[in-house]
Amino acid sequence: MPLYHSVFYMKTILICITGAVAAASIPSYIMNIRGGLDAKVIVMLSKNAARFVTPYALSLYSGNAVYTDTYESTENVLVPHIKYTQEADIILVMPATANIIAKAACGICDDLISTSIIAATAPVVFVPSMNERMWYSKPVQMNLQRIKEYGHFVVEPEKGIEISDSSESFGGMAALKTIIPLLKKFLTDETKSI
């Protein structure tokens, strides 16, 4: 039985994966989130993210179906962006690209994940991953400020490896050792702060 069973039993975490290279590491995050928090994990995967990780792999790690399209329905789920945003205790957009941050800042709903963010009733936490120059660009910083003003949360990126030249760079997706304690705090803290 997981260590945190009594505190987190029956929590639902919706993980929305967007198209950054860090998406390739998400199966490990899902496995650790499920085990460390004893949580149900539902996954939504953008078209670009599917270039880095497959729906099948994510389904194996999450133990649930993976949703990739706004109009995808099953016998039990007719409108995934409504059903799962209502069921979720927290929504993680991880990795969060500059693109999804911009869509959230502007209220654009043109795919499953952007529509889910707008439909969310649970707190939304963005875990960015992008090139350092992109992270510090004025448009991204303005969009981050805007989503924070909407009440969303942002977990700052960390140092990582720049894929283009293998150099150390800022902008990597926050590590599990950062994410798990933040989720624990968020799921047990009534003030909903990270």
Image (cartoon, helix red, strand yellow):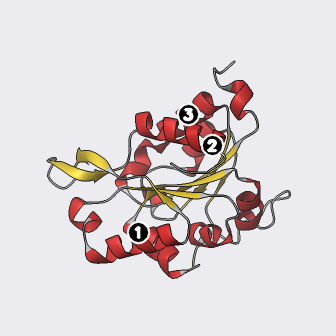
What residue do we see at 63% from left, 20% from top?
3
Q: Secondary structure at mark 1?
A: helix
Q: On the rendered structure, is 119 left or right of 162?
A: right
The quarter of the picture where residue 76 lies is bottom right
| Mark-to-mark CA distance, 3 and 1 | 28 Å
Q: Which mark is residue 189?
A: 2
Which is more toward the observer, 162 or 153? 153
Q: Secondary structure at mark 2?
A: loop
Q: Amino acid at mark 1?
A: Leu
Asked if disc 2 and disc 3 are in contact, CB closer than 8 Å, the reply is: no
What residue do we see at 77% from left, 61% from top?
83
Q: On the rendered structure, is 72 left or right of 62?
A: right
Residue 70: tell me if it is visible.
yes
Residue 140 vs 22, above or below: the answer is below
Which is more toward the observer, 108 or 69? 108
Q: Secondary structure at mark 3?
A: helix
Q: Which mark is residue 92?
A: none
Q: Amino acid at mark 2?
A: Asp
Tell me residue 188's x, y (percent).
65, 39
For the residue carrying disc 2, how many other residues have a C-alpha within 10 Å: few (<14), some (14-19), or many (20+)?
A: few
Q: On the rendered structure, is 135 left or right of 85?
A: left
Residue 170 vs 82, above or below: the answer is above
| Mark-to-mark CA distance, 1 and 2 | 23 Å
What residue do we see at 42% from left, 38% from top?
178
| Mark-to-mark CA distance, 2 and 3 | 23 Å
Considering only order in the chain, which callout, 3 or 2, is on the residue closer to the N terminus? 3
| Callout in the foreground (3, 1) | 1
Q: According to the image, label 3 marks what residue?
A: 31
For the residue carrying disc 1, how many other residues have a C-alpha within 10 Å: few (<14), some (14-19), or many (20+)?
A: many
